[in-house]
Image (spheres, rainbow, N blue to C red):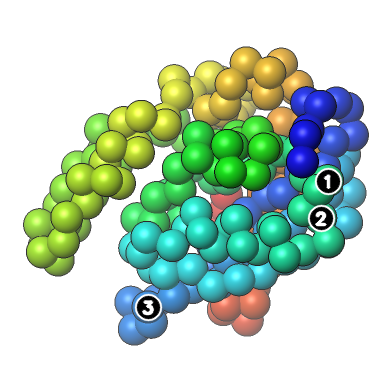
Amino acid sequence: MTHSGLKSGARILALASGPLNRNRSKTLLVGVVGRDSIIEGVLSSWVGIDGEDGLRSIEAMLKKSRFNDGVRLISLNGIAIAGLNIVAPKKLEKDLNVKVALITRNRPNRSRLIAALRSFSEREGVNFDDRIRVVERDTLKAKLINGLYVQADETVMAKNDMLKSAYTLLRIAHLIASGISRGESSGRV
């Protein structure tokens, strides 16, 4: 599959995990597919809370969907989903031949995330060195665009309308994941 790049109206997959319930090992992962802020479909899967399956879950979700060949951009609310389940954006881009944009309302704090990974690793007695390396390697300097912090390559940064659509779809994915998991949506992306 060869993607010609990001053109106006390109299809976007926005992903959000459901709330964390420490009595469970997994949470819902919702993907909203759309273009120009128009929803074309909703995907879902399960992902481990603080797990290591985020990348695999996203790839499997998209590959088995009818949208596999059409998605050009994946948007996430940061590099971590479902707690400390780290998604490697560069690997996701390579494996799926898409662009990835990490979009957040607040400035990403890489050192704080790394400290949280180390603390959790020590407390749980597991080695999170691989996750820390992904955070160090794959997080780019966040650029403030229209009040949102975006981490992506320059081809994505130049697509202001696409970033607006990606964030709108990201908010919808968050509302769906929260609403299904809790019975009513809550929180803000």
Dot 3 lies on which element?
loop
Query: What amino acid does circle 2 point to?
Result: Phe
Q: Quadrant of residue 161?
A: top right
Query: Is residue 188 visible to the viewer in this orientation of the structure?
Result: yes
- Residue 155, position in %: x, y? 68, 18
- Residue 15, position in %: x, y? 62, 54
CA distance for labels 1 and 3: 32 Å
Left of 28 or right of it: where is 30? right
**Residue underneath mark 1:** 70
Vertical placement of 61 versus 140: above or below?
A: below
Dot 1 lies on which element?
loop
- Quarter holding the N terminus is top right
CA distance for labels 2 and 3: 28 Å
**Residue underneath mark 2:** 67
Number of the label disc, if any, that sits on residue 102 = none
Q: Nearer the viewer, mark 1 or mark 3?
A: 1
CA distance for labels 1 and 2: 5 Å
Query: What amino acid does circle 1 point to?
Result: Gly
Number of the label disc, if any, that sits on residue 25 = 3
Residue drawn at x 68%, y 24% is 156
